[in-house]
Amino acid sequence: QVQLQESGPGLVTPSETLSLTCAVSGASISSYYWSWIRQTPGKGLECIGHISNSGNTNYNPPLKSRVTISVDTSKNQLSLKLSSVTAADTAVYYCARRGYMDVWGKGTAVTVSS
Amino acid sequence: DIVLTQSPDSLAVSLGERATINCKSSQSVLYSSDNKNYLAWHQQKPGQPPKLLVYWASTRESGVPDRFSGSGSGTDFTLTISSLQAEDVAVYYCQHYYGDSWTFGQGTKVEI
């Protein structure tokens, strides 16, 4: 059974960098595409970006300049870095497997506030 | 970027009745090289992450009740719940995974 578990700081200071990880169990991270998605009350579900099984990344254009997605195969985990955060980045962040997102993590809530 | 527009934004359906949700894409998500529509449907209940119901536009995910079905091709897609049950109250999202930048529809809230 494949399971994903997001983790990271629940509170981030404006202008700082948000860093999250997604621990993957039950599947090899190097065998699939992986995505980060976030959800805010005002904007619904938003794809942040994804990384392919060959390590190629694609980012949502409005976020592209601030986002880095990577994988650590030794730890079998996915990472997200979002720089220069503002209150608009307050959201629940999810990781998911495959383009059609067949497995989701439970999500981690992030608040951007001083 | 491809924009997905769902209709309606919300609907109320009696128990046992049919619910139909539409998703229109601003451009085709049918990939000619494999003849597959890169379109999925997800269900989200309060306090939970989304759950995959349908992928490739019409393939039901394992374990999903057969009252859920997806149809359509190109730019127009439909999710049908043939006989609404109380546990189907949720928000439903279409999502495409065509090309480099993937997006979701705005969601459709289904109530009894």
Image: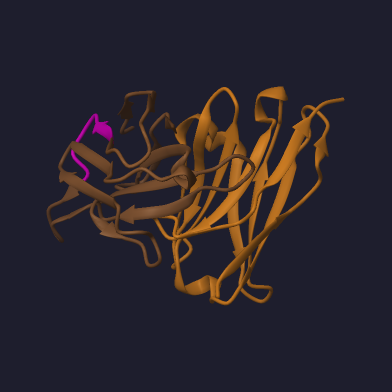
Chain colours: A orange, B brown
The x and y percentages for residue B48 are 60, 47
Q: Position of residue A99 (x, y in %)?
A: 39, 55
Horizontal side of residue A45 vs B110, given as left or right = right
Give the magenta-colored segment's residue range.
B20-29
Residue lying farthest to the front in this orientation: B15
Residue A39 percent coordinates (x, y): 58, 36
Residue at 16 percent of width and 44 percent of height: B72
User: Looking at the image, which is closer to me, B37 or A53?
Assistant: B37
Horizontal side, residue B2 vs residue B47: left or right: left
Q: Is residue A101 left or right of residue A19?
A: left
The residue depicted at 53 percent of the width and 26 percent of the height is A43
In this rendering, is residue A44 above or below B81?
above
Residue B86 in magenta?
no
Q: Position of residue A17 (x, y in %)?
A: 75, 39
Q: In which quadrant of the rendered image does the N terminus of chain B lie?
A: top left
Q: Residue at x 63, y 72 (%)?
A: A76
Image height of A86 relative to A58, above or below: above
How many circles with numbers are drawn on the protein? 0
Can you say whether A90 is above or below A73 in the image?
above
